[in-house]
Image (tube, rainbow, N blue to C red):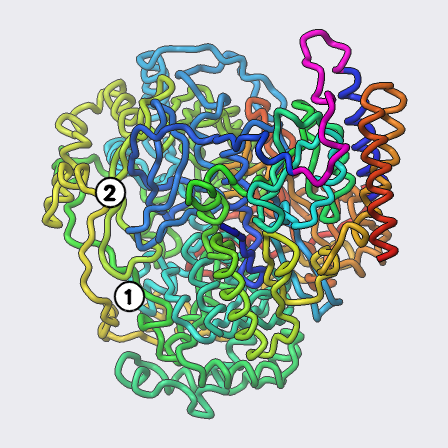
């Protein structure tokens, strides 16, 4: 280090000396500085220089980077947004943002943003191919899209149209006006295992990750790692709990800050959390350590559960999990006797769609929280208190009758999973294989928004699937990889240029709403998603479905139902509307019995086990692929959305292959070596990062990197996309996996690692 | 007024909110030149591993090696040596890199594009107006506090007591007698790449001297500023000698 510092010093000095010869550079201040009298403080000579402009205005908005939607206050200086702060009156933000939220102005002012509609003139598509964009006006963009959609409908039926987008009132209406069943979202890679369990066991499936971590005294995490991902409210509440002396037991194959700050790390074998939990449940029930009042009053099925877990001894679990039986017993007893205790959920943890058995793990997490007596209680897992009674889009703007669905059979087979089918969330994993095989049929034209190519399992194979489409339109803020595949591109504004409101969901102890107002005038010729959808609908001849639709009216009618109004919210002093009623724990659940059903008839009726029996994960190491694969997400980035942000990239510019230092030594790999990671699906090349805190039989790669769009000038070619390694599944494989949530099994494969 | 910053390492999640908030505000330096960044430390051996992050930035030393070696006296203590704020006057800085080599905490970096040294300024222009630092205002988990030095020392020591009572014997408030930035650490200072406390120019000066050696050579080759560098080098050697004798 010393040598390199000296070299820097010498190099810099030479630079300066060269500069000194140029006439326009002032002579440096060598004229008799006070070197001769070091006791004299030069303080008086210098003035402190402010970097801060005068603030001329402040605006309210809420973050659009992740779904926590932290409310923001934006300071404006002469029509330019200067600084973003968290809104102190928001339950989610509590006056702070995360690293991503603080970086958002670099997204807003990113010169790489899409600036006008475009069409592709190069019919060839794929990585490294220049789309040869031609700028077009909005009318032409709508006409081209409408023409392609109508042609596909005429030739192949309405089901040949696909929507790859989060649910959106305008989009949903166009989907239904067309009559296609194919609306595909990312949730099977995100949390549908939880959805399936919560919909059945609790009778309510939405947002299964609201937590009162701050008041917990014992936090037992099975891969819940939100602090190390800098999820704003989770990180803050976790640090609060730990600072107040809460114990954290972090059960995960890899050590992160969640395990390190709070106490104890248990390096469990990947995908075996279910066995650990089943053994815990057996101990807690057999030793009658559970909260009897809670279980008696609010649950059914404890006797059936007790019987079902009798074979799951700590010794049995120890063999599977590689955690000593005594440790499992100790954790079970501590968890059951420390109040309040919780097993937190988020999304892609052990109960998320990581493994074939994850839905059973999600089931056990509900059970453990119930046995602790903290479900929807202080210091426990909570149901979000969201504003109720707001009218829906179809209530405010009654629609002309929709046509019948062309077919209920979806291209991705989502209708074959009865518990989650009504959510219409769709399946990233199975779409690719179905589209390539043309079974049951192929999509011909599709609209994409915000779901990027890199988010799909085995992204290169997904690209091949996209090439089979006759036409794709993409709505985006940036020239993403999905845009590179597009025939027509619709640029949309960045969220800081838009208006609306958002209910607090991620940390909502009482109903609360945040205002979103444009912080500056739109920088480019962009239109909001609703406007794009309406334009396409009009051009397709479906304008009647949008005749009276008006965003301002929609906002107003929804807010009026809460006793406020769009005007009131826009004029509010803090950009918030709140109904501050005290938090009271739920006494009833919307299941058949009105209770939490530990033995679930709803699962049984749909052909799934009504109790969480043991089932192993799908993939185990082989000679060919000897290491478990783990995927994580860094604090500085949101999935594959933020790698063109200059600030976030300076905080973290690439990803690595994290490998245990002893495993690396045995493979002849040194820190910084280029290594190949190979799965049965694909391979990637990255630098190795030797770490101590990971099981020797695992490697871990962070998600979000490996962008190949050259128009993303900062993100381009940084790191690699670990998603390329995730095997896709056919519809049949997904159905046979028996997961009621049709989770994509993101970590359920093994890899080989060797020096490049 | 004496100010301080308290970094509570036992709360830091390593997210980098401070890094980006600082960089976003002091945006003039070129890409990748950061005034504060996250450092990751792993200690122990599998499976008994500890993972820690701390905010790595200028410690604002009372005895500031960077200031001592600066050949053009561009570095100064804003409110006196124990006032906790060491500032580079950017107009005066010639980007020579002497401070880079001298700093015992490996903090300053040269922004090659602007040919200036870059480091945390303690947001001194805000602090003297009674405001906090950008990083402390941004930290979402309360790991960075800013305020009057005495208050923060009391706050830090109380937290050390709590941690020790909870069995974390190595909890310690680093920097009480040396630096404007206090760090609440949970292990030996070496784990965090810090230097032994109670430091003097003598104990940290070896770095400064080595750095000076190469700088003097570079300056001699260029033939400009040699006198300045040489004078300060001689002076530093003399001080070091005196300190050693004392």
User: Which quadrant is the N terminus of chain A positioned in?
Assistant: top right
Are the numbered discs 2 and 1 placed on the same chain, yes or no?
yes
Residue B181 picture location, percent across and down: 59, 53
Q: Is residue A546 above or below residue B212?
A: above
Secondary element type, mark 1: loop
Callout in the foreground (2, 1): 2
Relative to residue B105, is residue A311 depicted above or below? below
Residue A521: image tag: none
Residue denoted by label 2: A575
Number of marks = 2
Residue drawn 74% across and 24% down? A32
| Vertical placement of residue B243 versus A589, above or below | above
Observer-nearest of A144 and A586:
A586
- Callout 2: helix, strand or loop? loop
Q: Relative to residue A165, is residue A208 depicted above or below?
A: below
Q: How far is disc 2 from disc 1 in space, using C-alphas?
A: 33 Å
Give coordinates of residue A168: x percent, y percent. 29, 38
Please state if A266 lies on the left or on the right of A5 as rendered: left
């Amino acid at each position: 280090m010393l040598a390199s510092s000296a070299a820097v010093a010498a190099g810099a000095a030479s630079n300066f000396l060269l500069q000194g010869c140029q006439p326009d550079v002032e002579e440096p201040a060598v004229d008799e500085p006070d070197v001769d009298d070091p006791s004299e403080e030069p303080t008086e000579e210098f003035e402190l220089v402010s970097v801060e402009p005068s603030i001329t205005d402040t605006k309210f908005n809420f973050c659009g980077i992740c779904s926590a939607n932290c409310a923001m206050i934006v300071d404006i200086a002469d029509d330019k947004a200067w600084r973003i702060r968290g809104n102190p009156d928001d339950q989610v933000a509590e006056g702070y943002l995360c690293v991503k939220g603080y970086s958002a102005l670099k997204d807003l002012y990113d010169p790489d943003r899409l600036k006008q509609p475009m069409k592709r003139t190069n019919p060839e598509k794929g990585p490294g191919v220049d789309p040869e964009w031609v700028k077009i006006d909005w009318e032409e963009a709508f006409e081209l899209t409408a023409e392609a959609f109508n042609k596909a409908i005429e030739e192949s039926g309405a089901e040949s149209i696909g929507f790859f987008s989060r649910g959106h009132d305008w989009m949903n209406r166009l989907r239904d006006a067309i009559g296609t069943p194919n609306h595909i979202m990312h949730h099977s890679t995100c949390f549908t295992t939880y959805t399936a369990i919560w919909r059945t066991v609790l009778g309510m499936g939405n947002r299964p990750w609201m937590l009162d971590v701050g008041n917990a005294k014992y936090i037992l995490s099975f891969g819940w790692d939100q602090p190390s991902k800098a999820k704003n409210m989770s990180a803050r509440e976790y640090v609060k709990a730990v600072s107040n002396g809460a114990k954290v037991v972090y059960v995960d194959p890899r050590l992160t800050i969640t395990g390190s700050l709070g106490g104890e790390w248990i390096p469990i074998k990947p995908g075996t959390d279910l066995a650990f939990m089943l053994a815990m449940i057996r101990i807690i029930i057999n030793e009658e350590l559970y909260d009897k009042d809670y279980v008696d009053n609010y649950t059914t099925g404890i006797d059936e559960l007790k019987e079902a877990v009798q074979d799951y001894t700590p010794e049995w679990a120890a063999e599977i999990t590689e955690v000593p039986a005594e440790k499992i017993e100790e954790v079970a007893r501590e968890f059951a006797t420390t109040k309040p205790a919780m097993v937190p959920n988020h999304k892609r943890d052990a109960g998320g769609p990581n493994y074939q058995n994850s839905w059973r793990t999600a089931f056990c997490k509900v059970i453990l929280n119930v046995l602790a007596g903290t479900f929807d209680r202080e210091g426990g897992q909570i149901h979000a208190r969201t504003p109720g009674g707001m009218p829906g889009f179809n209530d405010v703007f009654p629609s002309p009758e929709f046509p019948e669905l062309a077919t209920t059979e979806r291209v991705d087979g989502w209708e074959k999973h009865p518990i989650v089918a009504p959510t219409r969330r769709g399946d990233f994993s199975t779409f690719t294989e179905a589209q390539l095989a043309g079974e049951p049929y192929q999509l011909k034209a599709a609209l994409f928004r915000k779901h990027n190519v890199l988010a799909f399992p085995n992204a290169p194979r997904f690209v091949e699937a996209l090439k089979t489409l006759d036409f794709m339109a993409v709505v985006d803020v940036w020239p993403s990889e999905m845009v590179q595949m597009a025939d027509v591109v619709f640029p949309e504004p960045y969220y800081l240029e838009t208006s609306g409101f958002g209910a607090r969901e991620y940390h909502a102890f009482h109903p609360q709403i945040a205002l979103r107002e444009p912080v500056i005038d739109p920088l480019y010729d962009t239109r909001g998603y609703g406007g794009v959808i309406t334009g396409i609908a009009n051009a397709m001849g479906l304008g009647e479905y949008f005749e009276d639709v008006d965003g301002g009216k929609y906002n107003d009618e929804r807010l009026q139902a809460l006793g406020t109004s769009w005007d009131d919210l826009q004029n509010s002093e803090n950009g918030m509307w709140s109904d501050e009623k005290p938090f009271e724990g739920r006494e009833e659940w919307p299941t058949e019995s009105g209770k939490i059903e530990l033995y679930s008839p709803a699962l049984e009726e749909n052909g799934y086990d009504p109790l969480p029996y043991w089932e192993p994960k799908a993939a185990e190491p082989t000679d060919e692929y000897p290491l478990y694969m783990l995927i994580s997400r860094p604090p500085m980035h949101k999935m594959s959305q933020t790698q063109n942000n200059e600030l976030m990239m300076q905080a973290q510019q690439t990803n690595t292959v994290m490998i245990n230092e002893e495993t690396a030594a045995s493979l002849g790999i040194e820190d910084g070596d280029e290594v190949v990671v190979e799965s049965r699906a694909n391979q990637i090349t990255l630098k190795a990062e030797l770490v101590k805190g990971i099981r020797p039989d695992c490697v871990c790669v962070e998600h979000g990197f490996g962008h190949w769009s050259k128009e993303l000038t900062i993100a381009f070619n940084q790191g690699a996309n670990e998603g390329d390694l995730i095997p896709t599944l056919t519809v049949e494989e997904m159905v046979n996996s028996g997961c009621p949530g049709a989770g994509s099994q993101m970590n359920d494969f093994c890899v080989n690692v060797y020096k490049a | 007024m004496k100010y301080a910053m308290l970094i509570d390492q036992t709360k830091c999640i390593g997210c980098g909110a401070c890094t980006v908030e600082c960089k976003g505000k002091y945006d003039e330096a070129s890409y990748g030149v950061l005034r504060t960044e996250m450092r990751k430390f792993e200690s122990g051996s599998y499976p008994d591993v500890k993972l820690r992050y701390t905010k790595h930035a200028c410690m604002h030393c009372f005895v500031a090696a960077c200031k001592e070696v600066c050949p053009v006296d561009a570095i100064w203590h804003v409110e006196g040596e124990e006032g906790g704020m060491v500032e580079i006057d950017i107009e005066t800085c010639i980007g020579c890199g002497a401070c880079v080599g001298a700093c015992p905490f490996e903090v300053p970096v040269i922004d090659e594009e602007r040919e200036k040294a870059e480091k945390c300024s303690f947001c001194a222009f805000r602090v003297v107006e009674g405001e906090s630092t950008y990083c402390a205002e941004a930290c979402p988990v309360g790991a960075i506090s800013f305020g009057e030095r005495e208050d923060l020392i009391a706050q830090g020591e109380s937290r050390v007591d709590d941690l020790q009572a909870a069995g974390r014997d190595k909890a310690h408030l680093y920097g009480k007698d040396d630096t404007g930035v206090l760090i609440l650490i949970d292990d030996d200072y070496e784990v965090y790449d810090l230097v032994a406390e109670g430091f003097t120019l003598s104990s940290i000066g070896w770095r400064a001297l080595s750095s000076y050696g190469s700088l003097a050579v570079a300056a001699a080759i260029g033939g400009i500023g040699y006198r300045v560098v040489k004078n300060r080098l001689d002076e530093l050697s003399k001080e070091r000698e005196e300190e050693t004798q004392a």
